[in-house]
Image (tube, helix red, strand yellow):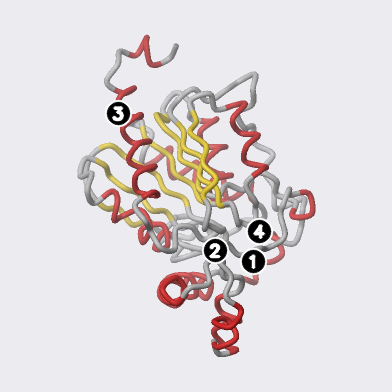
Amino acid sequence: MESQDLAVRTMGQGFPVLIIHGWTMSGTVEAHDFEPIFSKSPDYRRIYVDLPGMGDSPAGDIQDLDSMLERVSAFVDTHILSSHFLLIGTSCGAYIARALAYKYSSAVDGLLLRVPLVEPVTAKRDLDPFVPAIADAALLSSLSRADREMLGHVVVQTPEYIDRLRRRTEAIVLPAIAAADSAVLDPIRSDPDRYKLTAPLHDPETPFVKPTLILTGRQDTVVGHRDARSLLTCHPRATFVALDRADHGLPVDETNLFEALVSDWLWRVEELRQLSPSVRTQ
């Protein structure tokens, strides 16, 4: 693999879906959450890319989020752009996905933003203090100190939820963090001038008019849910959801709602794709 290549995991055949993970995560994390849904929809080619310095992708010469966007754009130009495609992004990956949706707006037929990063400067985010949806102080105190440190804020303090959160964290989240190139990534994340995009994004004057799904967590203390509401002004075909019992790591315990929302988005995309080009662009 050359230094400028991005590691990618491709699953299935059919209409391409580019899926971009969050900061210090990997395509493996995204596949864990989306494959149970896409495995029931066999007509999509899911492309799980690892951002530079994360997963199996080398950092190369990245200096900021703009250079990460350039690397992903080069991947799109080389491997996807002969076709229309869908975009899915989580957290910082959703921020990058929005820039890609603007750049390739004529080729992107749908956009899914999961817990999207909207305001890159942490101090400027509209966040609520952490309050669990279900609290059980006695249960938390019964956990080992190592478990409490590993799990952090637990939004649903029940034995079942904690067990699922522990297994998810150990199986996919911690390995992704360990694989990330912190020597390159940490300076970017700590510098507001580097941890932002200068590329254009859709706004009310230039809206993205294809089916969109914006998924936020009501108890998300990382990016919150109110900043993402502003995206409704530039995504007139968006479904916006602030899920209760959900933080920045949603979904932890899937109750079929996450799958139903993603499936509805795919249905809306396909409905529009079946129309003539003149109708699709109105």
The residue at which mark 1 appears reads as: 184
Q: Nearer the viewer, mark 2 or mark 3?
A: 3
Q: Nearer the viewer, residue 252 or 111?
A: 252
Viewer-side label of 4, 3:
4
Circle 4/circle 3 CB separation < 8 Å: no
Give residue 140's quadrant in the image: bottom right
For disc 3, the neighbor class at 10 Å (few under 14, some 14 to 19, many from 20) is: some
Q: CA distance from mark 1 to mark 4?
A: 25 Å
Type of the residue with mark 4: Thr
**Mark linked to residue 137:** none
3D distance between C-alphas at marks 4 and 3: 34 Å
Q: CA distance from mark 2 to mark 1?
A: 7 Å
Q: What residue did someone put label 4 on?
A: 221
**Mark 2–mark 1 contact, CB under 8 Å?**
yes
User: Mark 2 highlights which residue?
Assistant: 53
Circle 2 — which element? loop
Say which label, 4 or 3, has the lower sequence index. Answer: 4
Give me the C-alpha separation between circle 2 and circle 3.
34 Å
Residue type, mark 2 in image: Gly
Disc 3 residue type? Answer: Glu
Mark toward the start of the polypeptide (2 vs 3): 2
